[in-house]
Amino acid sequence: DSGVTQTPKHLITATGQRVTLRCSPRSGDLSVYWYQQSLDQGLQFLIQYYNGEERAKGNILERFSAQQFPDLHSELNLSSLELGDSALYFCASSTGSADTQYFGPGTRLTVL
Amino acid sequence: GESVGLHLPTLSVQEGDNSIINCAYSNSASDYFIWYKQESGKGPQFIIDIRSNMDKRQGQRVTVLLNKTVKHLSLQIAATQPGDSAVYFCAEIANQAGTALIFGKGTTLSVSS
């Protein structure tokens, strides 16, 4: 158990819908990262927040957004969902901005 | 561009053998490398890391070797056990990319008893 929690574990929704994925980092960690894992693209970095502010952006679609709240938990919002958005979404956290990242168990999103 | 890749997509070994999983990276500016293990249905689990100022680091039953000359990283697992069966990813952090991990495609290790 890494100490990073993610909810929900599974999410099934329809195309065009909007969902919110939630992540709680390890106690004391200030950085939260979001990654997408699909069969064809592997693990891809989406976005990082550090102490409430966006720190780095990767291959995140404009339909996707994220935020980190004062209690340091983070949410990833996915809107106008498409079939191709079906994937595992992982959250990771680290103490600072360049430390070892520890991953949560992931949320499996299925878009029908 | 920068990329992290693995030499073999699958590796099959017998229980008790030593396993070696290889990874090649292309960005000479990368200064931090991590190996993760991912079991089916779970998130990547940290195994061991190494910074570019080192060429070897040992953990419990695992050793990571870094060869910066040929941009090669390897993970050695001693006395491989069935519980080691998983997908192994190497990841790098390159200065230009900030703090995002760049993952290779993974090697599936299968251990038979």
Image (cartoon, coloured by chain):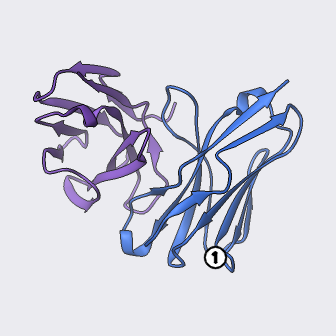
Chain colours: A purple, B blue
Query: Which residue, given by chain and number where applicable, does mark 1 sit on?
Result: B53
Name the quadrant containing residue A63. top left
Q: Residue at x 47, y 44 (%)?
A: A102
Q: Chain of mark 1?
A: B
Closest to the observer, B18 or A3: B18
Q: Residue at x 78, y 31 (%)?
A: B111
Above or below: residue B97 compared with residue B113: below
Above or below: residue B89 compared with residue B2: above
Position of residue A76 in the picture relative to residue B87 (left or right): left
Q: Amino acid at mark 1?
A: Asn
Report how many numbered discs are placed on residues in the image. 1
Position of residue B8 in the picture relative to residue A14 (left or right): right
Please state the horizontal and vertical placement of residue A52, each as a whole percent of the image. 20, 52
Name the quadrant containing residue A3. top left
Q: Residue at x 18, y 31 (%)?
A: A20
Closest to the observer, B89 or A97: B89
Please state the horizontal and vertical placement of residue B32, each as a whole percent of the image. 54, 66
Q: Quadrant of the C terminus of chain A?
A: top left
Please state the horizontal and vertical placement of residue A44, each as a whole percent of the image. 38, 50
Looking at the rendered structure, the secondary structure element under dot 1 is loop
Please state the horizontal and vertical placement of residue B36, each as a whole percent of the image. 58, 46
Position of residue B19 in the picture relative to residue A61 (left or right): right
Q: Residue at x 46, y 50 (%)?
A: A101
Task: Please indicate, yes or no, whether residue A30 appears anywhere in the rendered image.
Answer: no
Crowdedness of circle 1 by 10 Å Cα count: few (<14), some, many (20+)? few
